[in-house]
Image: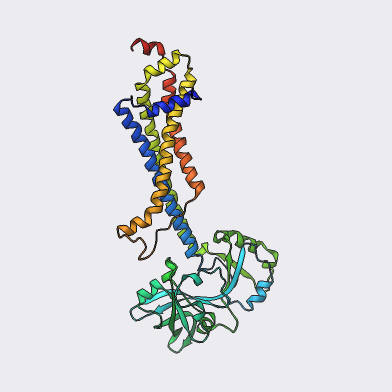
Amino acid sequence: MFKPTELFIAFRYSRSKRKSSFTRFIRKVSMLGITLGVMSLIVVTSVMNGFEDQLKTRILGLVPQVTLQAANGATLADWERQLASFELPVAVEAHAPYVAAEGLIQGPQKLQPVLLQGVFPSLEPAQSLLHEAMLQGRLTDLRPGEYGLIVGRTLASQLNVWVGDSVRIIAAEGQRYTILGAMPAQRNFRVVGLFSAGSEIDDQVVFLHAQDAQRLFRYETGHVSGIRLYLDDAFNAPQVVSELTNSQRFQRLDAPLTATGWEARYGRLFAAVKMEKTMMVVMLALVVAVAAFNAISALVLLVQDKKGDIAVLQTLGMTPQRIYQTLVWQGVYTGGVGAFSGVLLGVAITLALNPLLRLIGVSVFGQGERLPFVFMPTQIAAIFVLAIVLTLIATLYPAARAARINPAEILRHE
């Protein structure tokens, strides 16, 4: 005979055609609820993982992950000597100087605030996403003295400017004082390239050659705003900042520096995404819990339907404990089948999301942009186990009720 007996009987009860139609309906509904709940959890968590990964790549690949600046807010002189005066943490893969300030960009139709980011193309490391984000032109098209500008595709569309067009840059940094008052630094620049990071950076940051930025901001020769550090993982920024801050050699620099992580500027955005992801997971987990506890109804009806069989099994020597285990296995089977089906459906639907959206003509982020998703095996396994555990908990009451059946009482009325 099939061993263990409890598992064999539980499997037979799950597949039995002799149950009442209502009992079968309730069991299928509870199994379907678990399937849909698990499926929804996998789809939502995978897409939210994709959003988080996209934000991490597209935003933190362009903005400084950790910046080193003069502690007094002044410009940084002789940055190479400063950098050689202390040891960088092992998480730092590359570094580059930058010249940056807040400003305005003026096109034919509108004026918009932007961050003016001056870079040295020859010193820009491979870790910078700007190389990959270029749509038109190249980073090396920024040449000192030519006053070229690389703008995001979104910003270019808003200003109605394209490669070759002229725009006016206005910066508060480097302003002059005249008899008419303070005059901001301003100059015409020519758009030499377009980039697209697929994030808010596209309409908030413009890139120019650092030497042009130095002239515009009236920096002293060789001075920069700070040094950008590129990390092996952007989320290691707090640890890197802590290591630098606690370093004795960093603290004893002739010109003190401050280290700042990206979270100072973009931390709220990532916190909001994480909070939204957590709330959605909690809500969908409650859906799975409700579906799992529907198994109580299915098992109570099963016990009612199979009282005679349970009584016969007891008279044949099956102990209440084994009856209890049989009903628990029955619930685990229902939860396992529902959870496994949900995992398969969730993965399949997530993989088919972008083709389905294209088929019905829906574009979430704009033309050509795909809905991001990332599968995390440990996360999927946790969802699968959660569904089974919740179903297992839900089976305890009806299983205990079945174990307390009095066979003499039941068989007397059969």
Of residue 84 and residue 193, the one placed in the foreground of this image is 193
Q: How many marks?
A: 0
What is the quadrant of residue 308 in the picture?
Answer: top left
The percent position of residue 58, horizontal first and vertical second, equals 47, 65
The percent position of residue 367, horizontal first and vertical second, equals 35, 66
What is the quadrant of residue 228 in the picture?
Answer: bottom right
Image height check: is 320 above or below 330? above
Furthest residue in direction bottom, as rendered: 179
Residue 296 visible, this angle: yes
Image height check: is 47 above or below 306? below
Is 210 on the left-hand or right-hand side of 29?
Answer: right
Is 118 on the left-hand or right-hand side of 105?
Answer: right
Q: Which residue is painted at 38% across and 75% down in the image?
A: 156
The percent position of residue 375, horizontal first and vertical second, equals 47, 51
Q: Which residue is painted at 52% across and 83% down in the image?
A: 143
Image height check: is 402 above or below 143? above
The percent position of residue 177, horizontal first and vertical second, equals 48, 86
Is 291 on the left-hand or right-hand side of 126?
Answer: left
Of residue 176 and residue 208, the one placed in the foreground of this image is 208
Q: Which residue is painted at 36% across and 26% down in the image?
A: 16
Of residue 118 and residue 329, the one placed in the foreground of this image is 329
Is 126 on the left-hand or right-hand side of 34?
Answer: right
Q: How is the image coloured?
A: rainbow
Instruction: Please identify the quadrant where the C terminus is shown.
Output: top left
Furthest residue in direction front, as rendered: 1
Residue 268 visible, this angle: no
